[in-house]
Image: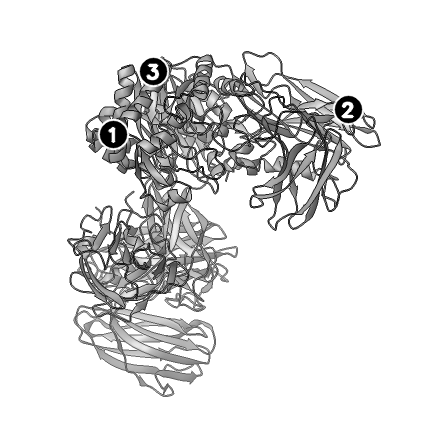
Amino acid sequence: MKPHRILPILLSLLLALPAAAKGLEADPQSPWEKEGDAFRIEHDGSRVVALKGSAEVEAETYYQIRWRMKASIDDPRPSASILVGVGEFGNSQNAYVVADGWNEYSFFFYSGSASRIDYALQTAPSSAKRLEVRGLSLEKIPAGRFADNLVPDGLFLAALKFPVLFQPIKENTNLAARLVPAPDFLAGEQCIRLSLDNPGSKPSAMESAYLPMIPGKSFRFTFWARADVDVVLNNFLNGWSMYRHSGGHWYKGTPFKIGPDWNEYSYVVDIPGDLAVYPDLAGRMLKINFSAKKRDEKGSIWISGIRFALAEEKK
Amino acid sequence: MQLANLPRAVRLTPLFALFLATPGMAEEAGRNLFFNSGFELGLAGYGFVKHLRPETNPKMVYEGLVIDAKASGGKACLRVPNRFGESCEIYVKEVRIKPATRYTISLDMRSEAADASVPVIFLSITDQWRIHGQTFKVTTEWKRYRYSFTTGTNTPLEYNLMIRHSWESNDGPGDLWVDNLQVQEGSETEYRPAADLELAPVCDRNLFIAGREEKFTVATVLVNQGDREAKGNLALNQINDLTRERKPLTTLAFSLRPGDRLTLPYAFMPAEFGSFTVEATVDVPGAVSIPGDYAAIEAIEKKLVDLDRTLVVGVNGGIGQPGYRWAGKAGYAARAGNQEDYIRLLSEMGCRLLRAWDTGAPFGWENTEPERGRFTYEESDLLVALGEKYGLRILPVLGNSSFLCSDTPPKGKFKANGWPAWVKEAGRKRTEISDFWKKGGIEYMGFPPLDLWEQYVRNIAKRYDRRLTHFEIVNEPNIYITAEEYVPYLKAAYKALKAVNPSNRVVGFCSTGDLGGNMSQFLQECFALGGLDYADAVSFHPYHSYDLSALMPADKAIADMGALMQKAGAKRPIWNTEMYYLRPGKTAFEKANPSGEYAGHRYLTDLGEGVAQSIPIENRSLFKNRVTEYLQNSGSMTEFLPGPMYAVYNACVRLFEGSRPYKKIRWANDSICYVYERDGAYTAAFWHYGTLANLAVKLPLDEANAELYDLFGNKRPLTTAPLPLLSRQWFVKWKGKSPDDFIAALSAAQITSPTTVSLGAAHLIPRADGGWALAATVANQSSKPLPVRAGATGEGVVAEAIAGATLEPGAFASFAIPVAFKKGPPAAARVRVWADGKMTDFPVALGPLRQTVVVGRTPGKAVELARLGRGERPAVKASFLASRDDKGLVLAVQVKDATPSGDSGARNPWEQDCLEFFLDAEPAAAALKAPDAYHGRVARLFVLPYAPKGKQVVCQKKDLEDFVPGKISVIVTARPAGYDATVRIPWTALGVADKGGGELLGFDLAVDDAVGAEKAQSQILWNSSGDAYKNRLGFGFLRFE
C-alpha cells in the first residue's frame, strides 16, 4: 500500500516562519522609564506619553513591529496605541487593549517608497495604571507568511485574557471580547468569547489591527465559531486606508449564521488591484471586523482559528 | 466491538456466569461445585472421549457413558463401559475456583477389574496448564477416594475434572463406575450435591434437520435433592449462539417432593436455521442448571461432486489420530459416536470435501507402508469408504510434512517424526535446519530416493483408483525445504499419478503464509523451475491474508497468485487448502474459533475471487464445546455439538454451491458485495469486513424483486429501510429478469454511518523547529467528499495548529498536527476530528518520545547505543555520528567488541557481528491498518565487518530501487578491539529530495554481537527495543538542518 503524503497544515504557529527581527530603540518620554531591556510608566491615564524612535526600512517591503506589553490591571478599553509614520503614506495609529499579564502585540505596515519610519508607542487616555513594554522589534514579513497565516496567533496559544489583536469599535469603547477556555475546540486552549450583552443599542463588535494583503490577489479568510443563541455574525474585511482615505472604499461584508456547534466559516475574497479606483489599497493593509447586531437577549459567540492567507491556486 | 466478534469462550461466559450467579450459588467454603455430581440428571454436564482400538474392537463399536442404577448413593451413578480395553477420558463440566486456595476432590468409584489404576486429574489451561491429580487403585467395591491441592495465583480459574480409565497400555478391559463427585474449598465434608434443585434441558438430538424431521423435543430434567418441596416455574429460552438473540420458548410449572426427579418435555418445531443454546431457569432460589444445545439446518442431498467444476464446502480433518499419544493406547478418538457418526455429521452439514489432515494423516507413507512391503491401509480405507458413503471427496496429502524427520519419537508421540525408518535410511539427510524445527524435536530433513517416492505415490493411486480424484503433494513445503528440493518430488508424483490414471489431478505447492512462510517467493521459485508443468492446481495456505481486512487483503493475495502464474506463462485453478485462523487472536484457539460468520466470509471471498476450492478450517471449529469450554485444546473436545460455523456453512451450501462469481462491488466503509450466478439465478452476499459499528445499508430493493436472507439462510423481510451492515453477512436473491438491474441496484446501495470519519493510527514525529507533531491518519467513511479538520487535545497536550483537507469517499490521509506538551509527553491524548459539522475524539496512546538526532554538515556528539535488543549483559558497546554532505547521509559507527565473529559461514547477517541500519524515508506515512508495519520506503542495510570484501553489504528494500550495495558506500576498518564503519547513503538511494534542511528520516541502528562462530547472542540498539526488524514506529529520527 503506498503511503499518502502529509497534507499541509492549514493554520500556522505563532512563530512558524522564522524571520530576522531587528531590535528597536526607543527614546522614552517622561515619565516613561527604561529599566534594563524594558520600559515602564506609572501614569494616571490622562496624558499621552510615548516611547519614540525611528528605523530604516527597505522600500516596497512588508514589516511587522512587535513588542510585549502588560499593565498593572486589566482594562477592556485601550490603554496604549502606536503611531507610525511611513513616508509618503503618512501616519497611522492603532489602539490596544492591555491585560495584567504579558501579551505579544503587532503593528503591520507596508513601506511603499519609504526608507525610514518613525514610531511612537504611547499611552492612551484610560484609567490609571502601570504599563510595561519590552522586546520592541521590527522584522520583515517573509513571503511564506502570506501562504501560511497573516493573523498573528489565530489560535490564541500565547495570548492572555484579551485577544489583543482586536480593539473595540468606536461605538463601544469597551472590548466586548475576552479569551475564555476552549476545551471543546480542535486546537489551542482558548478562544474569543464575544459577549452579546451590551446595554443599549451598541453592537457587540471588535476590529483587528491592520493586517497585510496584496492588491490584485485572492485571499482566503477562515474562522471557526459557535454561539449559544440564534445570531448572525457579520464579518467585514475593510480596505479603508490606515493613513488617509481617498477614492473608492473597498470592503467585503459577509453575514454568517452561527450554529450551536463549532463550525468552520471560510470564503475567498478577490482584492482589487486597481489602485486608481481604490487608492486606499496602496497601503496594502486591511482590517477584520466582527460584529453582531443589537440583541434583546444575552448570549455569546465563541471564535477561534482565525486565518487570513493567500488563497490556494485553482488547479 | 460487537459481542458476536468476541471469541466464543468469552461470549459463552455470560451463561457460565448465570450458572454460578444463580442466587444462593455464591461460592461458600465447603460447597460442592460440580454440577449433577450424583448423576441424578443423567449425563448432563459430562463429556467422554474413547479411543477405539481396531485390534480389540475391529468393528469400531462405540459404547458411550451409561447411567446405572447401582449407585453408591442416590438413584444413579455413571458407568463407563469398556469391554474392549480402550483408553477413556471422562470430563466433568468446568467449574470456576479461586486462586491460591486449598481444595479437596472426592469421588466414589468401583471397577470391574480387581485393581484398576484410575488417574483423576483436575486440569486447567487458564491456570497456566496446571494439573492437580492423583492415580488411585480402584477395587470392585464402592469406595470413596480423595485428594487435596492448592490452586495457583491466576484469576479467574476454570478447571475440568478428567477421569482416565484403562489408560495405559497394560490396563485391560473392564467397566468403571463413578458417583458422588465433589470438589470443595478446604477439607472434605460429607457429600452433598451442588444444590437442592438441579436441572438441565436436554434436546432429544443436537442436530435438527428441516425437511426430514417432524418433531423436536427439549426435555428438562429436574431433581430435588433437598429436604423440602421445590415448587415453581421453569422458563425455557432459546439463545442464538451467534447473534445472541433471545427468544422465549415456554414456561412450565413444576412441583417436586424431596427426592423426586421430574422430566418436563416441551415439543416444538425449530422455526429458524442456526445454532442455539437452550437455557432453563427456575424461580427457586439456589437452583443451578446448565444449558442444552441444538443446531437447525436444512437437509442437503449427499453426493460426490466433480471438484474440477464445483467449489464445495470443505474442511480439514479426519477420523482419528492413531499416531498421537492423546491416549495411553493408540486409538481413534471417538466422541459421542464413532468415526462413521462423525463423517455423517459432516455430510449432513453439506461438507463435500475432506482434506485428510491434522485429525490423522492416513495417506502418509509412514501410515501406509511402515515397513518395506508391509502395507497398512486400514485408516485410509475406512476414510475413503466413509467418504463415498456420505458424499465426501477425500483429498489426501501425499507425503504429509514427512521431510521433517527425527529418529526418536518426540515427547507425546508413539513414533518418530517423518518417513518410515526404512525410507529414512535409504534417503538423504540434511542436518542443517533452523532452530525453530530443532526446538520442535526435528533432527534433520529427510529426502527419500525419488524412485521409492514415486512407488509410494503409485501405490496410493492404484489402491484408490477412481475413488480418489485429486491428490495434494506435501503439506507446506516452503517452511522447511527449498523449491529446488520440492519440485523433483512434485514432478515424480505427477508422473506416477498420471501413469495410473490420466484423469488424476495433482494439487501442488501447498505454499503457506503460516509460521513466517513467504508464500509468493516459494511459488515464484517453483514456477521458475517448471513446477506448473507438474500440477493441475496450485494450493496455498493464506494465513497472512485471512480476509479482506488483513494487511495483505485476501483478494489481493489471490490476485497476486494469479499474476505469478501469468508471469510464469500458465494458469491453474487455485485451491485454498488450509487457513485455520480465520481471524487474528491471542491464542490459536481464539484465532481458529471466531464468530461463525467468518467461515462464511472466507468461503464467499474464495468463491467471489474465483478460487477453485476452499478448505480453510479445521473440522473442530464447526463444533461447540459445552463441557470443556475453557480447556481449549484439540484432545479435550468431548462432543460434537454443531455450532454457528456448522450452520453458516450449511447455508452456504444451500445458497451458493455450484455458483460462479458474477460481480464484485466494493462499497464504502470496508464493505463488500459479491454477486454470484447459479443456473441463471443471481444471489448477492454482502458484509462489513472492517471494524466500524452502527453502519447501515440502504438498498433500492424490495420483496417485489428480491428476497433477503440472513447468514443462516433464514428469510427476512426486505424493505427499502436501511439494513444493519455488520460482519454477519446478508444474502439477497434476485427475482427480477435482468441481472443488470440487480447489479445497478446493488451498486446504488447507500452506506450510512453515524461516524463519518475514523482514525487509523497516530504517532509523534519531530518537527523542523524542534517541536513535535502528531501524525494522525484519518479516513472518510462517508459516501461523499468530506472536508476534514484535525487537532488534538488531552491532559498536558495542546494542538498548535489545525490540519486538514477534503477527503474523497473512502480515502484517507495523514495529518501532521503540531502539538506542545506542558510537562513532557503524556501517555495518551485525543485526536479531535471535525467533519460534517461534528467533532469526534479518538483516544490515542502516545508512548515515549522517540530519540531524535539533529544532523548538520558537521557531526555532533557521538550517540551511544544504550538499548538492549537481546541477550542479558552484552559485551559490545557502540556509538554513531551522523552528518550530511552534498549527496546524502553520512554515518560513522564505532564498535567496541573484543570477540570478532569471523567468517559468516551459513549465518544470517543478524546472526554474526553486524551493523543493522533501519531507515524509513517516510516516517509520517499514513496507514489505516498496522501503522507499525514496514511500508515500501523502509529499508534495511546490513554491514558485516568480517565478511569477505564484496559481501560486507546486504540491502533489504522494497520500493527504494536505488537502495543497493552499489550505490551505498561502506568502509569498514577492523581493529583489535572492535571495528569502525563509515556509511554514505545518497538521497537518491532513500528516494528523498535534498531540500537543504528540514528532511526527516526514521532511523535506528542495531549492533549484533556473536562470539566467534556462534550465532549472535546479543544485540544493542539505539531507539527500539529489539523489534525494529518489523516495527518502524520503534525507530528514532534523524532531523536534518
CA–CA distance in space, label 3 to label 1: 21 Å
Residue B262, x across and y down, in percent: 76, 22
In this rendering, do the residues under marks 1 and 2 share a single chain? yes
Looking at the picture, which amino acid does disc 2 mark? Arg
The chain to which mark 2 is attached is B
CA–CA distance in space, label 1 to label 2: 68 Å
Looking at this view, is B51 or A314 the one in front? B51
Residue A173, x across and y down, in percent: 43, 68
Under circle 3, the secondary element is helix
- Please state if B664 lies on the left or on the right of B303 as rendered: left
Q: Which residue is mark 2?
A: B261
Label 3 or label 2, whichever lies nearer to me, is: 3
Query: How many residues crowd mark 3 within 10 Å: few (<14), some (14–19), many (20+)?
Result: some
Q: Which residue is mark 1?
A: B488
Which numbered circle lies on residue B462?
A: 3
Looking at the picture, which amino acid does disc 3 mark? Lys
Specify the quadrant of the image occupied by residue B1023.
bottom left
Sequence-first tag of 1 and 2? 2
The chain to which mark 3 is attached is B
Looking at this view, is A264 or B497 the one in front? B497
Which numbered circle lies on residue B916?
A: none
- Counting the numbered discs, the total is 3
